[in-house]
Image (cartoon, rainbow, N blue to C red):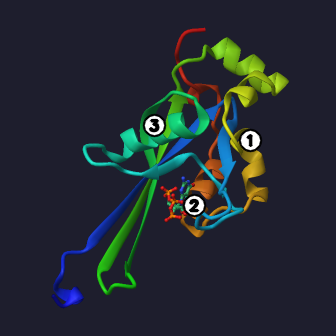
Amino acid sequence: MNPSLQEPRFKKIGVALVIAWGHVIVGQRQPGQSFAGLAEFPGGKVESGEDFAAAACRECLEETGLAVAAERLLDAWQSIRVADDGIEEIFRIEFWQCRPVSLSNNLLESSLLESSLLTSSLAGAFHWVPIADLAQLKFPSANTKIIELLLSRNFSQSEEPHHGS
Ligand SMILES: Nc1nc2c([nH]c(=O)n2[C@@H]2O[C@H](COP(=O)(O)OP(=O)(O)OP(=O)(O)O)[C@@H](O)[C@H]2O)c(=O)[nH]1
C-alpha cells in the first residue's frame, strides 16, 4: 500500500519529573541510545493498556528503583515527521510531576542533605540534582520548555509531597 495512505504511527513517551526538596532525578542517556550522553529524566515508551502517567511511573521504577506516584501533567511536546518507510509518525512526550511513595519526608530530606541514601538506592546513572543546576545540563531539545518551567518556578515547600514523615 502507498505509505502516504496508511494510518500514522504513534510513538508515546511518558517521562517522570521526580521532584523533592528542590531536587529532581536526572540520568544520562547511555551509549547506543538516541541522544547518547545527553541528560534525561526517567521515562520511556507507553505500553499497551497504559496511559502516559502510568508509563512514567513504571519506567521510573525500572530505571531508578524508586516507586513514584504521578501528580500532574507539567508539559507535553509533540512532533510529526515522515519515517524512513514513508509512514507519518506522531511522537508525543508527556512530562509528569511525580512524588516518591516509599520514602518518608524526613528520610527524603536527610538523604538529600547528606547526598547518600537516595543516591545509593538509584540505579545506574540517575541522581538527585538541584533544580537550579538543570541550566548547566544538556537535554534533548524536546525538554527545552520543561527545563525553563522548572527553573522559572519556585518549587517551594508547598510543592513538596505531603506524605508520612
Ligand atoms: N526518558 C526520557 N526520554 C526522553 C526525554 N526527552 C526526550 O526527548 N526523550 C526521548 O524519548 C524517547 C524515550 O524513549 P525510550 O527511552 O524508550 O527510547 P530508547 O532510547 O530506548 O529508544 P530510541 O533510542 O529508539 O529512542 C527517546 O527518543 C528519547 O530521546 C527525557 O527527558 N527522558
Write down the residue under mark 3: 57
Q: Position of residue 107 (x, y in %)?
A: 69, 14
Q: Rounded to the nearest whole Å, what is the CA distance between mark 1 and mark 3? A: 19 Å
Residue at the far right: name it: 114
Q: Is residue 78 left or right of residue 62?
A: left
Along the polypeptide, which appears first: circle 2 or circle 3? 3
Q: Position of residue 140 (x, y in %)?
A: 61, 65
Does the residue tagged 3 have its C-beta within 8 Å of any atom of ligand 1?
no
Q: Rounded to the nearest whole Å, what is the CA distance between mark 2 and mark 1? A: 16 Å
Does the residue tagged 2 have its C-beta within 8 Å of any atom of ligand 1?
yes
Q: Are marks 2 and 1 in contact (CB under 8 Å)?
A: no
Q: Is residue 9 above or below residue 69?
A: below
Label 3 environment density (alpha carbons within 10 Å; few <14, some 14–19, many ≥20): many
Q: Quadrant of the N terminus?
A: bottom left
Residue at the far bottom: name it: 2
Q: Is residue 44 above or below residue 84?
A: above
Which is in the foreground here, disc 1 or disc 3?
Answer: 3
Write down the residue under mark 2: 143
Q: Which residue type carries mark 2?
A: Asn
Q: Quadrant of the C terminus?
A: top right
Q: Which mark is residue 129?
A: 1
Q: Position of residue 24 (x, y in %)?
A: 66, 39
Q: Quadrant of residue 123?
A: top right
Q: Secondary structure at mark 2?
A: helix
Between 96 and 121, the one lying in front of the other is 121
Q: Which residue type carries mark 3?
A: Cys
Along the polypeptide, which appears first: circle 2 or circle 1? 1
